[in-house]
Every structure is written in C-alpha cells, then in structure tokens.
Image (cartoon, helix red, strand yellow):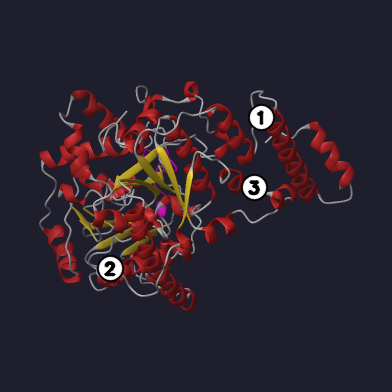
C-alpha cells in the first residue's frame, strides 16, 4: 500500500526513535485517518468520495452512490451480518445493493459478536464512527439483534441429532482440528463442544422466532456450516424458507459460491447437471483444458483458467526424485492416497467409514504394514505446506509409517506433480479431495473414505464401513473396476460445473470492502446476475 508523503512525514516526526515496523504502523494509521477525513469532507460537500482505504470511507462512498433511494416496494430479504468483519461489511453492502433494487433489507446480527469485532481502537471509534456504528444509523435498513430474543440452553425439540453433529463441526473449525479428534487439545475441545452445543441451541430458538416474527421468505448468510450459520441453515431448511449460503471461491479470485438450504460447499451436483443441459464439443474441450492445467500444461485457449489457483508446484513432466523412482521399482501393486488440508471447511461433516482423516490414514497404514505385497504412496495435499493449520497429515503419515518399507510419504513441500504419480499407480484412495475424481478420469479405480461432492456420480467406489473399505482395497488391486464412458462424461461435466460455471464473479478479486462499489456502472454482469438470483428474479441455480 502506498503511503502519503504527509503521513510518512508525520510518522517520522512523531516516532523518529522507534523501530521501522512501529513507524510503519503509525504511518498506516495516519494514512487511514487522512482517508477517512477526506471521505467525510467529500461526502459532506457532495463531492465524489475517492482514495478509499478504509471500510468507513467505503461506506461513505456507498451512501453517496445510493443517493436518495425510493421507498422499498418489493419483498423483505434478511441478510446475516456474522462471522467476521469481511462478512459483516459485505452484508451491509449487499443490503444497500438490494435496497437500490427496491427490496427491504433486514440485517440479522448479534450485538455481542459485532461489538467484539468492532471494539474501539482509534479515537473516532469512541465517538460513534466505526463502520458498524455508522451502518446502524442508515435509516433505510432494518436491524434485528439475535441477542434480544429469548434464548434457552435446552435443545430445541427435534434438533437433538443435528446439535450433536454440528457442535463437533463448529468446535473443529474454530480450533482448526478435525471433528471427533480432540487429542491435540482435549480440554479446549471439550469446553468448545459444550459451548458450541449451547450456542447452536440458542441461535436455533432465537432464529425460529425471528423468521416467524418478520415473516421471512428469503434469507442470505455466509457458509451454512460454520458457527451460528449452521443453525440458520438447519432452520431455513426445516421451515421451507429459501436460504442462500455463500462462500468466497478460493479457486477463482472474486468468485462466489452459493448453496440453497445447504452449506455453500456442499454442492447440489444433480441440480447443476440438470441446469447444464447438453454436453457439447466446446464443453468437452474446456474439461480437457482443466485436466491439462492441473497437470501443469501451458494452455493457449483457456482464458478462464488464467487466474485459477494452481495446486501443483511443478509440471507433470518434471522428473520424479530418485527416492520415488526407486520406490516405484518395487514388486506388487501400487496405491496412491491423497489427503485434504485439515482446516478446510470443505472437509467437515464428510466422514463415512472413518471419523476423520487421521483415523483413515493411520488404519490404512496399518493395513499396508500387514500386507507387504502391496505398496502405498501417501501424497500430502500440496497446499498443506502453506495453509494455516494445526494438524499436518503429511507429518502424521510420516510418523506412523516410519520404517515400513512398502510405504512412501510424499510431503506437501516436495516439488512433485501429483499427476506424475497417478500415471504410475494401480489404485487411488481419497477422502474428499478432487484428486479422487481426477484419478478416476485417468482410468484408475478409486476408493473414497468419505462423502465427496462428486460421490453421487458413482464414478468412485464408496464403501460405508471399515470392513468394506479394506475388502475393497484387495478387490480393486486384484480385479480393478474403472469408470465407464458415461461416468467419465459425468466426471468431466462435474469439473466443468464446479470450476467454470457454478461460481459468479460477484465480489472483488481481493475480497476487500474498499473495492466494493454501488455505482451501477461499476457492476459486472455476473455481479448483477448474482444479486438477481439472491432476490429470486432468476432461478436458484444459474450461470453467467
């Protein structure tokens, strides 16, 4: 971020004896203060608000761009301002966007949560000038505080099973652990589990009362899986309210995903397949381009993949290390096990034969230890090397497999393209990672240990018990069953849906409040499509 000469000069005068990092912080604070002051002055004098560097300045610009809206004449839409500042500020922006389209936005929030998120840090925030304090003064918006509704610690009737499952999901995400795996932090996990159960129960009872009081027909929220949003999602699903649950799509900067009465990362694959329609030659080319991109190829025609997140650190053609080549010379069949990153919310609530990836990896290692006639390569997810995690499956696998000659661990930090390994193995094993589908599309029999988004395609084998899982290992090694041509077509259609059309470019590439604009001229066609879907002007599932 560029600092204005004034702020650098002032920081130097105020702090000339301080370390550069502290000087930088003071310079930034001054720069932000100047930005806010300029925005306030420009807003007050009806000049365009420019040089936005803070969410407060961004809000002033939105209000200026909104001008004087007409009274809402369309249905109310409730939007949850929860989780963190990014989603709270997105909720306010979205409320104003929908207000401009004639809808009555209702902001659902928790005063306890937002007061913690916007705890005063700077002088102006002690005088009612934080982003949230300014937003609360906007007369066009309605605000509903969850905390003011009657709440109970008791389990709402009929939600007992949900609360048991969801509490584990909430605490696992908060502690960056896996569900049902408290060993790394047992005391905090147990305390967090109780707190999550209470929090979910309270929010279910409060939210049920709110949606009835306000006759909510349409609801928008982040996630549907994390924190109190899990309670919202379960309530809208049970009461038949149209609930949209959103996530930023890390694969494509600026893109948003949504699920209807389901968490955003639990894809409605059958629904999207119906929307997709006919499989054309052009779509086949796009699917092939995606597969080639994953292998590290340079593509001429795939503009949609230019900013796509590339997981693999090197091209497939890069030679494998000597250690790996020597291992691949062993006699017997080879299995490749691909993990997910612990902490990725896409892995939550997915367990089937195993309660967690850790259990799956450990028990699979035990199986191969007792079956030296087979060989196992465990490939830790490449993103594990930089992810903010507390549990690294590559390290766990290395510990439990130490000294076992027929098991090789390929760490996340190793410069190896996973698809170079896929070519050399006989059977694939996966949790919910896309590597499972990718191996199946490349002619390998694949066994899943959890419910992946692509499970419904039946392109992979999915045993539901441990016994069936281990029996499948032997059966697929000796009598492999690979995907049929129709299953391969469906697998490619899944790739096309998930990675090209299922998300819309409805956010900024940086996912920052300061980038948002209400000015109609600044709205991309996909952003307008996105909000039309949220408002019910277009079908629930649609692509740009």
Near mark 1 (Cα within 10 A), the count class, few <14, some 14-19 or many ≥20, is some
Which secondary structure, mark 2? loop
Q: Quadrant of the C terminus?
A: top left
Q: Nearer the viewer, mark 1 or mark 2?
A: 1
With respect to residue 113, does 459 lie above or below?
above
Q: Which disc, if any, is residue 130? A: 3
User: Which segment did they paint magenta?
Assistant: 309-323
Structural distance between the alpha carbons of marks 3 and 2? 37 Å
Structural distance between the alpha carbons of marks 1 and 2? 49 Å
Residue 107: horizontal and vertical position, in percent?
46, 47
N-term mark: 3 or 2: 3
Residue 402 in the figure: left or right of residue 447: right
Q: Main secondary structure of the magenta part?
A: loop
Residue 372: horizontal and vertical position, in percent?
25, 69
Q: Which disc, if any, is residue 159? A: 2
> Splitting the image into 4 quarters, where does residue 33 fall?
top right
> Splitting the image into 4 quarters, where does residue 316 fall?
top left
Asked if the residue at tag 2 contacts the one at tag 3, i.e. Cβ–Cβ closer than 8 Å, the answer is no
Q: Which disc, if any, is residue 43? A: 1
Residue 172 in the figure: left or right of residue 443: right
The answer to whether residue 163 is visible is yes
User: Is-magenta flag for residue 316?
Assistant: yes
Structural distance between the alpha carbons of marks 1 and 3? 16 Å
Near mark 3 (Cα within 10 A), the count class, few <14, some 14-19 or many ≥20, is some
């Amino acid at each position: 971020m560029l600092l204005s000469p004034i702020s650098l000069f002032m920081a130097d005068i105020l702090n000339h004896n301080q370390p550069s990092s502290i000087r930088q912080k003071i310079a930034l604070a001054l720069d932000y203060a100047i930005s806010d002051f300029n925005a306030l002055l420009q807003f007050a004098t009806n000049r365009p608000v420019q040089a936005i560097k803070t969410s407060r300045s961004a809000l002033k610009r939105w209000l200026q761009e909104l001008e004087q809206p007409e009274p809402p004449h369309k249905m109310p839409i409730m939007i949850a301002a929860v989780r963190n500042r990014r989603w709270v500020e997105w909720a306010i922006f979205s409320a104003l966007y929908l207000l401009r389209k004639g809808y009555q936005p209702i902001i659902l929030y928790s005063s306890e949560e937002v007061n913690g998120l916007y705890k005063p840090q700077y002088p102006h925030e002690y005088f009612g000038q934080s982003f949230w304090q300014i937003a609360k003064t906007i007369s066009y918006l309605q605000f509903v505080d969850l905390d003011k509704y009657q709440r109970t610690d008791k389990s709402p009737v009929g939600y007992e099973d949900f609360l048991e499952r969801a509490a584990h999901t909430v605490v696992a995400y908060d502690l960056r652990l896996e569900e049902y795996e408290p060993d790394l932090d047992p005391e905090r996990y147990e305390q967090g589990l109780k707190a999550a159960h209470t929090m979910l129960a309270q929010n279910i009872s409060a939210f049920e009362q709110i949606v009835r009081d306000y006759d909510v027909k349409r609801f928008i929220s982040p996630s549907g899986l994390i924190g109190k949003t899990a309670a919202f999602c379960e309530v809208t699903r049970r009461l038949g309210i149209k609930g949209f649950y959103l996530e930023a799509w890390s694969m494509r900067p600026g893109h948003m995903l949504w699920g209807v009465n389901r968490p955003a990362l639990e894809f409605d694959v059958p629904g999207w397949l119906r929307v997709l329609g006919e499989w054309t030659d052009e779509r086949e080319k796009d699917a092939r381009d995606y597969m080639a991109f994953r292998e590290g190829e340079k593509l001429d025609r795939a503009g949609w993949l230019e900013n796509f997140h590339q997981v693999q650190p090197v091209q497939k053609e890069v030679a494998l290390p000597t250690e790996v080549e020597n291992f691949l010379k062993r006699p017997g069949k080879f299995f490749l096990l691909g993990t997910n990153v612990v902490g990725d919310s896409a892995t939550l609530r997915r367990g089937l034969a195993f309660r967690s990836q850790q259990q799956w990896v450990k028990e699979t290692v035990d199986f191969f230890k007792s079956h030296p006639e087979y060989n196992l390569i465990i490939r830790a997810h490449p993103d594990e090397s930089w992810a903010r995690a507390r549990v690294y499956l590559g390290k766990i696998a290395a510990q439990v497999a130490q000294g076992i000659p027929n098991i090789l661990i390929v760490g996340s930090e190793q410069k190896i393209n996973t698809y170079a390994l896929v070519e050399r193995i006989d059977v694939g094993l996966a949790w919910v990672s896309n590597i499972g589908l990718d191996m199946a599309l490349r002619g390998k029999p694949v066994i899943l240990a959890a419910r992946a988004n692509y499970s419904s395609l039946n392109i992979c084998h999915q045993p539901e018990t441990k016994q069936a899982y281990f029996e499948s290992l032997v059966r697929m090694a000796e009598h492999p069953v690979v995907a049929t041509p129709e299953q391969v077509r469906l697998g490619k259609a899944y790739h096309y849906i998930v990675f090209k059309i299922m998300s819309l470019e409805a956010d900024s590439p940086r996912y920052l409040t300061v980038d948002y604009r209400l000015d109609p001229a600044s709205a991309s066609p996909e952003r307008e499509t996105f909000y039309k879907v949220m408002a019910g002007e277009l079908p629930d599932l649609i692509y740009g």
